[in-house]
Image (cartoon, grey):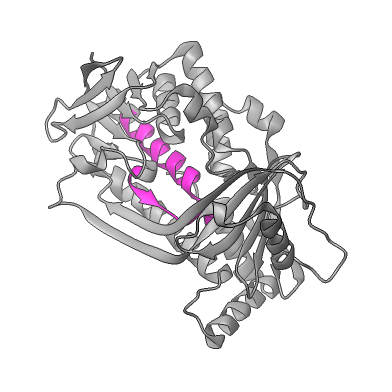
Amino acid sequence: MRTSVGIVGAGPAGLMLARLLRLAGIDCVVLECRDRAYVERRQRAGVLEQGTADALRAAGAGERLDREGLPHDGIELRFGRRRHRVDFPDLTGGRRVTVYAQTEVCKDLIALAETDGPPVLFEAEVLAVEDVDTDAPRIRFRRDGREEVLECAYVAGCDGFHGVCRAAVPAAVSRVHERSYPYAWLGVLADVPPSHDELVYARHDRGFALLSMRSPTVSRLYLQVPEGTKAEEWTDEEIWDELALRLETADDWRLERGPVTQKSVTPMRSYVHEPMRYGRLFLAGDAAHIVPPTGAKGLNLAVGDVVVLARALEHERRTGSTELLDSYSATCLRRVWQAERFSHDMTALLHRDPRAGSFDDRLQLARLDRITTGRSAAADLAEGYTGLPLG
């Protein structure tokens, strides 16, 4: 089997890249180890930056997004039982975000691929990515019990943090930057309408809490818990009680409760692999970087990466120049590190570090006070949250 671009992974990065290449007339094949049903129900991110939503629309994947997505013009910060709204359009010149689950983005892109290509091969386990430092990379994979080879001009590693592509970059040229946090998120999906019409980020002495949503009838909520916590250690009633406590306000706002349909724990970490390109292998999304979820940046960074990569591949095809391909890693990493900074700052601003003392607590409150009373600090948060330009 032969193609121009072999794409490993059918998450948002791989599927979006495939769509962009299809529109540019560049042939590609997507290999995904899981089945279609798994990909379409895999719960991950749910907040799209302005640039991500615009990129999906430009790629022809905006119809259902515009019909079912929930546009948000701000977030609410809570601390000391007080409520403070950050108005995105006012602070950014009109930018906003849209709540639209990653599962829905994947469904939309898979449906487009099914209609007019490119091929997405599900249950195709990639065994190795080889010869990426030559002009003839190869992807060895197993499908239907048979081992096959996909020969290509370029390989896009969109296979996530635990995929095989990053391992194809020699250790001698790899640089890894990472940080782990001493807490995690206990997340729940609940069949109950959201208790607020925008996301609520709460800083509390007992730990962080987030009120989010997936639709007008489904809430997504999170609690800061100690690192290593198991989801089954918390009963549904304990989760609701703790959320109500941490999200409590001095007015008459109340948290609505409902049946919990899903419960999980998300570790908190920051990770960047440099470079994001080696030979004819290009890493994108979680294969190259991880951010703590506080800043809602993971999916958006992945889309940013593949927009840059698709543009570079189209430029090479049209002009014969590899200039944009050669600058891919540096171009993406500038945006990645700004997102890492923003995500780390949001995490440090709102979470209770178990090692912290009263001095650290008062610094947190001072930073929150600065954001909620000073326009320049609020604008920095709003610009970071709604996202830097893609590319």
- Say left or right for 295 vs 203: left
Decide which of 269, 105 is in the foreground and name it: 269
- Say left or right for 180 vs 277: right
In the image, residue 298 above or below residue 38: below
Q: Quadrant of residue 142?
A: top left
Which quarter of the image is occupied by the C terminus?
top left
- Find residue 339 and report its horizontal and vertical position in percent: 45, 56
Q: Please identify the residue farthest to the right as the structure is shown.
A: 252
Q: Please identify the residue farthest to the bottom as the structure is shown.
A: 359
Q: What residue range appears in magenta?
A: 287-313
- Find residue 11 and report its horizontal and vertical position in percent: 44, 33
Q: Residue at x 57, y 64 (%)?
A: 380
Q: Magenta: predominant secondary structure element?
A: helix
Which quarter of the image is occupied by the N terminus?
top left
Decide which of 229, 139 is in the foreground and name it: 229
- Find residue 224 and report its horizontal and vertical position in percent: 57, 63
Can the viewer see residue 188 in this picture?
A: yes
Q: Quadrant of residue 209?
A: bottom right
Q: Quadrant of residue 43?
A: top right
- Find residue 49 and report its horizontal and vertical position in percent: 57, 46
Q: Residue at x 27, y 44 (%)?
A: 327
Can the viewer see residue 76 in this picture?
A: no
Decide which of 320, 368 is in the foreground and name it: 368
Does the magenta segment cover residue 293? yes
- Say left or right for 151 vs 212: left
Q: Residue at x 24, y 23 (%)?
A: 141
In the image, residue 4 above or below residue 242: above
Does the magenta segment cover residue 180? no
In the image, residue 6 above or below residue 325: above
In the image, residue 378 above or below residue 68: below
